Amino acid sequence: FNYKTVYAFAREMHPKTEKFDVQYGTAGFRAKASTLGYVMYRMGLLAVLRARYKKGCVGVMITASHNPEPDNGVKLIDPCGEMLEQSWELWATKFANVADDELVDVIHEIVSKLDIEMTQRVEILVGKDTRPSSPSLAKALCDGILALSGKPIDYGIVTTPQLHYFVYCKNSKHEYGIPTEEGYYTKLSNAFKKLRGESFNNGNYFNKILFDGANGVGAKKIKYFQECLGDSLKIEMYNDELIGTGKLNFMCGADYVKVKQTFPNGVPQITEQRCCSVDGDADRLIYYYLDENKKCHLLDGDRIAILIAEYLKEMVESTGLEVDLGLVQTAYANGASTDYITQKLKVPVSFACTGIKYLHHEAQKFEIGVYFEANGHGTIVFKKEFKEKLKLALENTSLSNEQHGAIKKVLTIIDLINETVGDAISDMLLVETILHSKGWSIQDWEKKYTDLPNRLMKVSVKDRTQITTTNSERTCIKPDGLQDEIDTIVARYKAGRSFVRPSGTEDLVRVYAEAISQEEADQLSLEVALKVY
Ligand code: 16G
Ligand code: ZN
């Protein structure tokens, strides 16, 4: 490669402006957009190296998800459509933090250590959310790609899960789908319409939903779906402000609704009406409704996961095939949801650390792995062998017509799902499909079990790295004795559970507690927080 170009571009166009180090965290780099120019340039360089190393195309998404509009961020997508492999996060951090005149050395280092062949032509798919800072950051990113002679393919404004999907489609040689927006809409909406059939309403289910687009990319993209879906689902869209109005995620969107446990601004308050919110890059989904006392009822990632797992279990059982289906949750999953799914539905649950990459990999251990974080981010992954088993069973003449029908239905459900990463729009279409098939209102769905009251607290500490955890973050190992103290406190509460973990995205410690009443959950979290402080 031409190291002169790499250095000249760095020095003249994208010099390192920040003195502090940044870290490739749970969801890539995230910071105030004005500080990210040089980081983008360097991620362009790294993306080309990653693509050459993997001998495929990779993706780079520019977004800060649910964060405020002045923030931005960047994350790399691996050829299989998954998050960047963890061992490369260290390279990403190194690339971002070296001085401009050390960049070339780091490139030499990675190329020789990993034996990367530098002559390959590679394509880098670039996507961005609706933040006003995104176009200039995309330009910096593309300069990095070009400096190492990679070929940027600009997808413009897309949702994060769309870009994951395109990357996987490209690398699977279109076996997974066509890597265009149109290909994506067509695949998902065709599957949806097939599953919905001729009657759009059923029992307590009515095919109208209020959709909060968080004034972001989700609002833009849902319009295409509405066109494809016709009358089968009526999506009434709210919070679709123009780019640059400063309203992205502001008092609306999935994160706002989940954290504040309240109704978003900009959506009409219609009692008992099913509503949903997505976040700023449309990878999280939360459902909710207002009751007659104007109380907001949330149906979060836990509820969505259980609805899906239960439905898939029933569907697969009717095919007559043996299937290993499991659910993956994090420590934040409400205890009532875990009890319901393990005891009532007899579906095994695995726990993973917070962060999508951990859940995704844990879910891949099952033939059908359903995973969701309580914040509404999740999807379902199907083992390749399982899909083949289904296709093979279609040719088996000893199965009944009902079984063949069920197998076809499962295959169509798989087409409705974006397996690469949590996808708010695909998840919404799946939830709508299940509610329709069961003839349920959102209230029927909520009735399945009752959440334990809970409280999440943030505690500022001097050094959050002093706290380390194990057992998927549910047990604290350091500082010594803290877990014993937590255990002693928890034992005094009926249905009590509490854990502490250092945040991966903010400089603080999170304390979670649940108990039989809200007062007790509040009290428990406070007692535990005092031990951490
Ligand atoms: C990131 C993660 C999200 C997780 C959150 C936890 C991805 C794509 N995003 O936003 O899944 O819930 O971090 O934040 O993995 P925390 O460590 O500050 O609690
Ligand atoms: Zn997001």
Image (spheres, grey):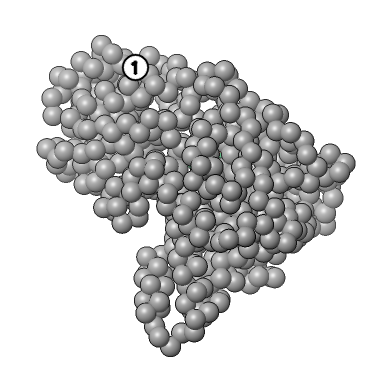
Query: Label 1 sits on what residue type?
Result: Lys
Residue 190 seen in the current view: yes
Residue 466: where, in percent of width, then height? Answer: 57, 38
Q: Is mark 1 within 8 Å of ligand 1?
A: no
Q: How crowded is mark 1: few (under 14 residues within 10 Å), some or many (20 or more)?
A: many
Q: Name the residue under label 1.
A: 16
Vertical comparison of 71 with 228: above or below:
above
**Depicted 371 relative to depicted 23: above or below:** below
Q: In this view, does 42 lie above or below 378?
A: above
- Report which quarter residue 110 is drawn in: top left
Quadrant of the snapshot with the N terminus? top left
Q: In this view, does 436 lie to the left or right of 505?
A: right
* In the image: residue 189, left or right of residue 91: right
Quadrant in the rendering for residue 136: top left
Instruction: For residue 497, say whether it is visible.
Output: no
Pinpoint residue 167: horizontal percent, then vertical percent.
Answer: 33, 44
Q: Left or right: 311 with respect to 15?
A: right
Q: Please tell me which residue is depicted at 31% across the width and 37% down the height of the picture.
A: 125
Residue furthest to the top: 12
Nearest to the observer: residue 49 or residue 68: 68
Q: Residue furthest right?
A: 293
For the image shown, how many numbered marks are present on the structure?
A: 1
Residue at position x 74%, y 58% in the image: 204
Quick check: 182 left or right of 42? right
Helix, strand or loop status at disc 1: loop
Q: Position of residue 284 (x, y in %)?
A: 56, 42
Residue 386 is situated, as x and y percent measured from the top left of the image, at 41, 70
Residue at horizontal 32%, vertical 26%?
Answer: 141
